[in-house]
Image (spheres, rainbow, N blue to C red):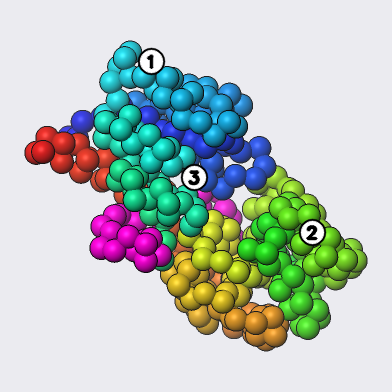
């Protein structure tokens, strides 16, 4: 039996879709709406006016962090043609849960949203680790997990790996890039660093003094195309982290690029062990000196294993099928309630 083609509202965050620079969740939203639209679903994206998508776009601004602007736009669009599903990537439901009587679900995009999860109707988690963390606050929480996906199909294997290691992320105390700097100095290997400065004090004290444009190079914010090229050519991605990662998209990008990962973490309850197996797709370490040792062992990791992991768990098909399954379950539950 052919399933009904749904009318689906997708609620984005405060950044354009796709993002011009930083914005990993906005890239996930972009691939979600484009795929659903390609499959023939009636998709409406509520997002900032700079967004460029093939489905219908309803322009809303989120810089004031209010849900009123969206709700008025949603009501108007719903009167034209009622929605079957509203999928929120902005965690707006818990602010005004009584407003959303629709078949509403929300992808929880951050580990810092637990205050809202209690009231969030139908939360969707990005990893088992994220769901387990939520259960520390909400016992017996029953919710689905859908792994996100970016664009594995556009990433091409580069067998001519360069000799540099790559750090791709924020410069702050959560991402602790100084651990990567300490490791490459111990291992005497080059490091390319890029993205953006999120904590000025941390950056000036822990990161900026070590840029010498010889061993340690800072490229700053770069485009998605340049990120992809850097990942495909890097010897390995260095991923230090000082907090519970929900599902670090850069890890998925690295695996899809056939690039091993050396992850440093103090908390084994985060997503890192869920994404990479130690000595399989890379290494999981606890200190900078262990990261340096892993750097010296990186040739023992097979590039093929990285791509196999990416294709087995983190694909467009699995992500969209996961979301569609949730949508149809919500509709069925409404019929039987």
How packed mark 1 is, by other alpha carbons closer than 10 Å (few <14, some 14-19, many 20 or more), is: few
Where does label 1 land, which residue?
A: 76
- Label 3: which secondary element: helix
Where does label 3 land, which residue?
A: 28
Q: Who's the residue at 83% across and 65% down the image? A: 205
Q: In this rendering, would 92 be left or right of 59?
A: left
Where does label 2 land, which residue?
A: 201
Identify the mark nearer the N-term, 3 or 2: 3
Q: Who's the residue at 33% across and 29% down the image? A: 99
- Distance of label 3 from label 2 (alpha carbons): 31 Å
- Label 2: which secondary element: helix
Q: In this rendering, would 5 be left or right of 170?
A: left
Does the segment drawn in magenta span residue 180? no
Asked if 261 appears above or below 49 in the picture, the reply is: below
- Distance of label 2 from label 1 (alpha carbons): 45 Å
Magenta-tinted stretch:
131-159
Identify the mark nearer the N-term, 2 or 1: 1
Residue 303 pos. (x, y %): 56, 71
Q: Are marks 3 and 1 in contact (CB under 8 Å)?
A: no
> Which secondary structure dominates the residues rendered in magenta?
loop
Residue 29 pos. (x, y %): 48, 40
- Label 1: which secondary element: helix
**Which residue occupies the foreground of this view, 163 or 88?**
88
Residue 328 pos. (x, y %): 22, 40
Does the segment drawn in magenta span residue 143? yes
Asked if 74 appears above or below 333 in the picture, the reply is: above
Asked if 65 appears above or below 112 in the picture, the reply is: above
Residue 28 pos. (x, y %): 49, 45
Image quadrant in which you'd find residue 72: top left
Q: Who's the residue at 26% across and 31% down the image? A: 101
Q: In this rendering, would 68 be left or right of 100?
A: right
């Amino acid at each position: 039996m052919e399933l009904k083609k749904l009318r689906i509202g997708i609620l984005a965050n405060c950044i354009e879709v796709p993002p011009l620079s930083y914005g990993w969740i906005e890239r996930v939203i972009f691939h979600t709406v484009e795929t659903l639209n390609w499959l023939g679903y009636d998709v409406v994206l509520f997002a900032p006016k700079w967004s460029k998508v093939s489905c219908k776009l309803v322009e809303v601004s989120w810089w004031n962090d209010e849900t009123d602007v969206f709700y008025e736009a949603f009501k108007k669009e719903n009167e034209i043609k009622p929605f079957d599903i509203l999928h929120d990537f902005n965690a707006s439901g818990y602010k005004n849960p009584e407003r959303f009587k629709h078949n509403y679900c929300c992808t929880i995009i951050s580990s810092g949203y637990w205050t809202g999860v209690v009231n969030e109707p139908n939360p969707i988690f990005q990893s088992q680790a994220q769901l387990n963390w939520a259960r520390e606050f909400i016992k017996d929480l029953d919710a689905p997990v859908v792994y996100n996906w970016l664009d594995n199909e556009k990433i091409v294997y580069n067998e001519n790996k360069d000799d540099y290691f790559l750090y791709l992320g924020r410069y702050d105390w959560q991402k602790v890039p100084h651990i990567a700097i300490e490791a490459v100095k111990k291992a005497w290997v080059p490091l390319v660093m890029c993205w953006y400065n999120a904590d000025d004090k941390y950056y000036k004290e822990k990161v900026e003094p070590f840029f010498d444009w010889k061993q340690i190079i800072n490229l700053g914010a770069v485009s998605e195309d340049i990120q992809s090229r850097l990942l495909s050519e890097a010897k390995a991605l260095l991923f230090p982290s000082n907090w519970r990662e929900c599902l670090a998209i850069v890890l998925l990008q690295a695996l899809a690029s056939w690039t091993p990962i050396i992850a440093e973490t103090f908390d084994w309850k985060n997503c890192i062990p869920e994404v990479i197996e130690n000595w399989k797709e890379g290494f999981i370490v606890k200190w900078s000196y262990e990261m340096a040792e892993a750097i010296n062992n990186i040739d023992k990791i097979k590039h093929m294993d990285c791509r196999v992991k990416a294709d087995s768990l983190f694909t467009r098909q699995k992500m969209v099928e996961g979301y569609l399954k949730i949508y149809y379950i919500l509709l069925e539950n409404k019929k039987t309630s």
